[in-house]
């Protein structure tokens, strides 16, 4: 009985050691590939940013009469450059646009994140004021710029459902499928619950 356990323990140690070495080698390859990409990215010259898909806020289409902080934020953002860079790593951005543009691109993306929050807050206040049509307009705009907010998609789906416009939920699903954020899965699950 003793030799069986000894043999088993030795085999376990051998298998574990081989597995550990294999994992370590694979991790080293992944790390080397990452650092190689980083080195390449850090050598890319500054590229022209004029062709980016800049987002314009159609303030003229929004009521803007609630005198709320989110309206002030939207006005301020309307004077800034906004770009949705969700799904891009810093390395991706440096490879595409050059290391010298990274800070600028980070600012544009930060403006986008602020926009998503402001639109969600604004639509929430409009709904609380029983202004569903205005909230719907804000939410539809948010979806058009690929705002990756679970609240935005599910609230708009609920508005469509309540107003008998369930056919528009299919369009929301199509829009959500194009998202590049981690919230995409949850958004799609919520939207698909309306079509079940």
Image (tube, grey):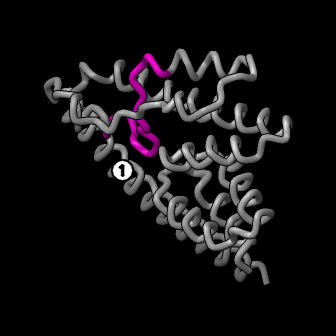
In the rendered image, which quarter contains the C terminus? bottom right
Given residues 11 and 137, the one toward you in this image is 137
Given residues 37 and 149, the one toward you in this image is 149
Tell me which corner region of the image, top left, top right, bottom left or bottom right, holds residue 43: top left
Asked if residue 30 lies left or right of residue 190, the reply is left
Is 177 one of the magenta-colored residues? no
Tell me which corner region of the image, top left, top right, bottom left or bottom right, holds residue 98: top left
Given residues 43 and 79, the one toward you in this image is 79
Q: Is residue 65 above or below residue 31?
A: above
Q: Is residue 114 above or below residue 8?
A: above
In the rendered image, which quarter contains the N terminus? bottom right
Asked if residue 92 lies left or right of residue 67, the reply is left
Q: Is residue 36 above or below residue 79?
A: below
- Residue at 46% x, 42% y: name it: 86
Residue 138 position, x and y percent, is 62, 41
- Residue at 62% x, 52% y: name it: 183
Magenta span: helix, strand or loop, mainly? loop
Label 1 crowd bin: few (<14), some (14–19), many (20+), radius 10 Å: few
Is 86 one of the magenta-colored residues? yes
- Residue at 53% x, 15% y: name it: 76
Residue 181 position, x and y percent, is 53, 49
- Residue at 69% x, 74% y: name it: 6
| Magenta segment boundaries in residue numbering | 78-92
Tell me which corner region of the image, top left, top right, bottom left or bottom right, holds residue 95: top left
Provide the residue designation for mark 1: 30
């Amino acid at each position: 009985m003793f030799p069986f356990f000894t043999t088993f323990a030795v085999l376990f140690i051998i298998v574990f050691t081989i597995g550990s070495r294999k994992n370590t080698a694979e991790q080293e390859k992944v790390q080397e590939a990452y650092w190689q990409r980083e080195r390449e990215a850090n050598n890319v010259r500054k590229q022209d940013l004029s062709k980016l898909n800049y987002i314009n806020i159609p303030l003229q289409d929004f009521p803007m009469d609630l005198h709320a902080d989110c309206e002030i934020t939207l006005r301020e953002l309307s004077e800034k450059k906004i770009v949705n860079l969700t799904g891009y790593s810093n390395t991706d951005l440096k490879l595409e646009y050059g290391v010298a543009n990274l800070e600028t691109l980070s600012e544009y993306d930060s403006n986008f994140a602020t926009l998503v929050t402001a639109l969600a807050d604004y639509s929430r206040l409009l709904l609380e004021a029983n202004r569903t049509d205005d909230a719907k307009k804000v939410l539809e705009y948010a979806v058009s710029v690929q705002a990756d907010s679970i609240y935005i998609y599910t609230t708009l789906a609920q508005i469509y459902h309540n107003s008998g416009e369930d056919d528009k939920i299919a369009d929301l699903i199509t829009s959500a499928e194009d998202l590049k954020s981690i919230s995409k899965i949850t958004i799609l699950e919520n939207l698909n619950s309306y079509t079940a």
